[in-house]
Image (spheres, rainbow, N blue to C red):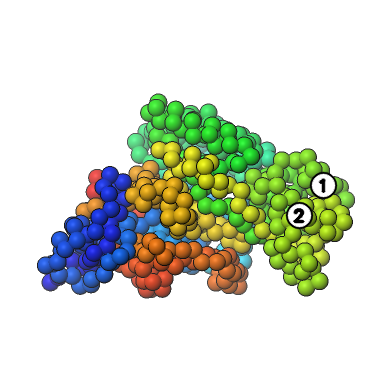
Amino acid sequence: MADFDTIVRGGTIVDGTRHRERFTGDLGIKDGLIAAVTPAGGLADRSADRVVDAAGLVVAPGFVDLHTHYDGQLLWDPYLSCSSWHGVTSVAIGNCGFGFAPTHPEQRERAMLSMERVEAIPLATMKAGMDWDWETFPQWLDSIQRRPKGINVMSFVPLNPLMIYVMGVDAAKSRDPNEHELKEMLRLMEASLEAGGVGFSMQRLGDGFTSVQRDYDGTPMPTDTMSDELALAFARLLKQRGKGFVQLTQAKNEFTADLDFGIKLAEASGAPILWNAVQVNERHPHQHRRMLKWVDEARQRGLKIWMQAITTPNDMRFKLDSFNLFDGNGAWRDVTIGDVETRMHKMQNPELRQAVREDYDHGSAPFVSGPIAEIVVDSVSNPENQRYAGLTIAELGVAMDRHPADAMLDLAISERLQTVFYVTPFNYRQDLLDEILHNEWTMPGVSDGGAHTKFLNYGRYPTNMLQDLVRERGSYTLEEAHYRLSALPAMAAGFGDRGTLEVGRAADIVIYDYENLRMLPAEIVHDLPGDEWRYVERAEGYRHILVNGESVFVDGECTGKTPGMLLRHGRAAGISSAA
């Protein structure tokens, strides 16, 4: 019998701890766990069922992505692409208070309509791809457990479906729960956490301009307007249990995060808070600096707050037939709700059109896209409009001899909203981004994997970090990068069994060609249920991606193996938190 299932020989090991410099070494895997880590040649006389030659390659812990929306996609895609293509081996779902459990059978259609808007997952895809073999959250976890998984999954308990399950949609959006309803919600929350939920999540963006992720009818989601006291009631439950953590997306208005509430939540829960999100604001850098100062001060007070950072260029392509990320601007939201015919009709309404012009002239730029004037016409569907491709909206107004907002809408209407617009990155200036990267309490991520499928793909963030921020810019050392990509999110989320290459840890491993690692161009693929499409970006240079000791990708090709696990309470069954 072989000593190991797999030996990885002669690779440059970056173990994720950042306390140990990279070294050339061997790594042994047994029963899905790392069983040995030695200098090169240390396992020369040991046997294995399989040997991976990693000479000239980096061997590092698999990446941990704590902010995804793969709740639907995991039902039809065991590999949760695009994240797994970029070395992600563990993800958290149920973020922002959004999810599908608990849900009464008669609420299923309404839940999918909400998710179509807030996270831009096509309704046709959810209808075709979701079998709904659950109702409660514990049943949801059991459903995930039964399904084949290419990578590991853990889940928050999202507050929106919980509130709707107990109170109904209208009541959950308009009032606090009564005593009976609150007691029932806390009972369901405790049962959900006991079943393996890792904590709870919520989005609290209010009813103002920042509520960019709204319900399908344009109204805020229940957690957007929930009271502080209700949120703190859930927090106190975590404190009573002494475990779990909170994912929070929080703001007061377009430019100001409600940092005071973050402190209250951390104090009431005694739990780690994953604050979403901090990113460069080139026009108002004092905003991200204020947040970094805040987290430093919170840490000095002993509060366990972590900042999840958007470190990927926020480039984005979209069509106005389904785009939802203007929802934070009232005028633009009014003309981008409904089906294509409804949207086109609204875009031609004189009063709504005037409001759009006034917002363009005097409003604040949507924080997801920057100034409308700087958006580019990426491609057109009508050959007669080819002369407009490549122009900014400001230039389009000149070319069409009309107000730029009118020009944008008129061009889109002439093509039945099939014009493709492109947002050029505006959150990626190196000196400002380095301020975020170098803060001790920030971690890269916020991929939104599985969401906004026709607009963006931030699931590429690990490859982007290694290729651009490490190799090209030098913002991080390789040791620091792998600490931030794996060990830090695992630590923040309470993982005890993965995130570093140490004996006893799960064998989630990426093996890649550092010098030749690169992102490939964005492409459209028609691979979603319901005959729907999405934008994807693949990577080149990942030689092996292992999950629990099994290779799921070799040289970019899927092996068909599904060794991923449901991580109830954030860890594999049978592995203690002290592993």
Residue at horizontal 65 percent and vertical 50 percent from the top: 369
Callout 2, which amino acid? Ile
Quadrant including the N terminus: bottom left
Q: Which of 387 and 326 is in front in this view?
A: 387
Residue 308 percent across, percent down from the top left: 47, 44
- Between the residue at mark 2 and the residue at mark 1, the CA separation in whole angstroms equals 12 Å
Q: Nearer the viewer, residue 312 or 100?
A: 312
Amino acid on which the number 1 mark rests in the picture: Arg
The image's mark for residue 393 is: 2
In front: 90, or 370? 370
Q: Residue at x 53, y 41 (%)?
A: 432
- Residue behind mark 1: 357
Foreground label between 2 and 1: 2
Where is residue 400 drawn, in percent x and y? 85, 59
Which element type, helix, strand or loop, lies under badge 2?
A: helix
Q: Can residue 200 be seen in this view?
A: no
For disc 1, the neighbor class at 10 Å (few under 14, some 14 to 19, many from 20) is some
Query: Residue 538, percent across and down?
Result: 49, 66
**Mark 2 vs 1, N-terminal side:** 1
How many discs appear? 2
Q: Is the residue 201 above or below the residue 420 in the image?
A: above
Q: Tell me what residue is drawn at x 88 percent, y 51 percent.
A: 350
Quarter of the image for residue 492 reads top left
563 horizontally vs 85: left or right: left
How packed mark 2 is, by other alpha carbons closer than 10 Å (few <14, some 14-19, many 20 or more), is many
> Residue 107 shows which numbered tag?
none
Give the image location of residue 477, x and y in percent.
37, 49
On the question of residue 544 being in view, the answer is yes
Residue drawn where x is 74% and y is 70% of the image: 381
Residue 544 located left or right of residue 188: left
Q: In this view, does 35 lie above or below 233?
A: below
